[in-house]
Amino acid sequence: MSNITNQPAKIGSYSREDVLFLLKDLSDIELEDSTFNRELRVQSGQHYSESLPIEYQPPKEYVDLFWSTISDYKTKVALCVGIAAEQIYRQKGKQAILVSLARAGTPVGVLIKRYIFLRYGVSLPHYSISIIRDRGIDENALHYILSAHPRGNIQFVDGWTGKGAISLELTKACREFEEKYQIRLDDTLAVIADPGHCTTLYGTREDFLIPSACLNSTVSGLVSRTVLNTQYIGEKDFHGAKFYREFLSSDVSNEYIEIIASEFPAIMAEAEETALKRAYVEIKTEFLGMQDVKSIQAEFDITNTNYIKPGVGETTRVLLRRVPWKILMRDPSSPYVKHILMLAKEKNVEVVPYHQMNYLCMGLIKSVKGTSR
């Protein structure tokens, strides 16, 4: 194994006790473009990880909805975090190293770390690293972690599952890592919500609104999506990201952590009981999301499954940073989709009633290739 000269970037608004970002700081580089231009380039063959969308700053009523969502579901989120954390600690104990997948996984990793410290008095290492669909995981970051913790046992963490693309990418990356370096990693992905049935380690399989899916960097430590562009990322570099210091006044990352963590004492007994029950049942990964996606792809004549994003979290992302075509909605009366209906109205996106799916909603991305604005 080669010596790694990369060091954790001093980026983000989280405490270094909560998380270390193994990312290259690209804050001074202009990587953003309009949503439409970027969508056009992506659909014309450029990989989405080579650029960044302009960071969406939602209007006041949407931020107010974020806060009301936290008020309504903070206990549920805390319980799901606790259930996942109990399973991690039961399986890996003090040797566990939390490795969250930036950026949706970062607040979840911070919360799991906080829960385990409160519950067991153990402060687990927590790193946030990059994994990119069709490009794989940041191997330099993995080498850094394994060098720092030679006896550790990595536990990958993310926010939620959709079609399962990242779960599959992680499995592929771990297999390739073992082939290259003869080091076996556990590819099980710990998430708060697994509506896609893509992992065996989850808080719930209900498709519900995780408040951190509502906002972008301002609830994820002011860190951008990760970037892998060979213009700026060398062979020995970590993948990159930007630190949006200009949004410090709007940052709620740490406040969100404190609100959810304050619920932990009330849910610990239920979390432990649920996790214990899980240890004695067979949990299957059936990737139900992909089954739904393929039937919708055929029905709506969509050329690429990447244009279909299932679940509340992924639909939110479509509305925030892609060019949405339609939103399929199983139950518009669900409290988990209030913000989606608000965003769809704001952006003049059609909401189509659609009851034949496992998810509450799906976001369909507009094909913009061959068009101009």
Image: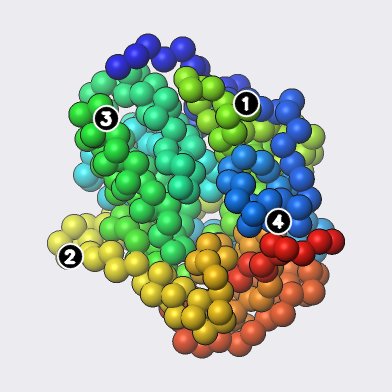
Q: Earlier in the sequence, mark 4 or mark 3?
A: 4
Locate residue 16 relative to residue 84 in the image: left or right.
Answer: right
Q: Earlier in the sequence, mark 3 or mark 2?
A: 3
Q: Which residue is mark 3?
A: 180
Q: Percent x, y for residue 68?
A: 67, 64
Residue lying at the far right of the rendered structure: 373
Between marks 1 and 3, how big is the CA–CA gap?
25 Å
Between marks 2 and 1, how big is the CA–CA gap?
45 Å
Label of residue 40 in the image: 4
Disc 1 marks which amino acid?
Tyr
Q: Earlier in the sequence, mark 1 or mark 3?
A: 3
Q: Is residue 165 above or below residue 182?
A: below
Q: Which residue is mark 2?
A: 282
Q: Residue at x 46, y 63 (%)?
A: 162
Q: Residue at x 29, y 68 (%)?
A: 286
Query: What secondary structure is found at the residue carrying circle 4?
Result: helix
Q: Nearer the viewer, residue 199 or 247?
A: 199
Q: Residue at x 59, y 57 (%)?
A: 213
Disc 4 marks which amino acid?
Leu
